[in-house]
Structure formats: structure tokens, C-alpha cells
Amino acid sequence: MTRVTKKKFVRDEVTNDYDLPTKEQQIVRVVKSCGSNLHEVMTCDGKTFIASMPTKFRRNIWVRIADFVVIDPIVEGDKVKGEISRVLLEDQIRYYKKQGVWPGIFLHYRQIG
């Protein structure tokens, strides 16, 4: 698969994926970019930790501070405690709010940009 084709499929997956998070997954807010595809994220409890960006998103999808993402927890990680599985766009956030799965504390946060 060429780079352009891969980018197209990844972009389609990000924009058209409205699956609700599983019990293991968490909705978190990006607080800081640490470099090397690592991002510091904040949970709805106010805890912060580092989450990694998977290879399929690198150079295809950009995550900015104040964006919301869905992560899969990494149990065995010391510093990196999660991996980003989905980047949430405004339409997906609205859908999550309608379904009642959006964390209440994040209702007060507004996405920048």
C-alpha cells in the first residue's frame, strides 16, 4: 500500500469511526506533547500520564493540545500507560454526548482550534 493510499484509509477511519469506547478504554484530553509520538493526557479523574501514538497515526493524523482521544490502557508500562486508539473529532464528541458516554468533567472543556 502506498503512503497516499494508507493516509486515505487512516483519515477515513478517523472521520467515520463512531464506535463507543469499550469498558477498558478511556476518553482523555491531551495536555502536552512530549515529543517522539508521546502525549501527556488527563483522565476525567484529573490524573495525568503519558500515552503513545500508534504507528498507523504517525505522519497521518496530528493531535494538538486540548484534543480528546480514546486510549487503550497499557498495564505493564512504567511511564507510558496508554496507547491512543482513536482521535475524536467534533462530530464524534457530539455523538458520544448524545449516547451518554461523555465524561461529565469534560463538558466544561472546549476544544481549541
Image: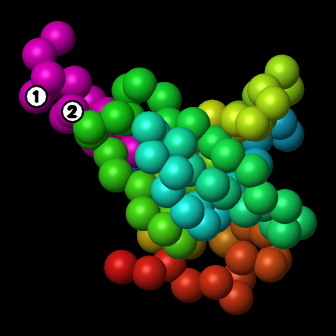
Say whether residue 84 is magenta: no
**Left or right of 16 on screen, residue 99:** right
Of all residues shown, which one is farthest toward the right?
45
Residue 89: image location, x then y, percent? 44, 62
> Residue 51 placed where, x, y %?
63, 42
The quadrant of the picture occupied by the C terminus is bottom left
Q: Please tell me in which quadrant of the rendered image residue 72 appears.
A: top right
- Judging by the rendered image, the residue that carries numbered circle 2 is 7
Residue 4 got which mark?
Answer: 1
Which residue corresponds to the image point at 52% horizontal and 51% vertical from the top-left? Answer: 34
Q: Are marks 2 and 1 in contact (CB under 8 Å)?
A: yes
* SS for dot 2: helix
Q: Is residue 22 above or below residue 77?
A: below
For residue 88, say whether it is visible.
Answer: no
Quadrant position of the N terminus in the picture: top left
Residue appearing at x 27%, y 39% in the figure: 60
Q: Which mark is residue 14?
A: none
In the image, residue 72 sits, relative to residue 103, either above or below, namely: above
- The answer to whether residue 55 is left or right of residue 110 is left
Q: Tell me the magenta residue range.
A: 1-14
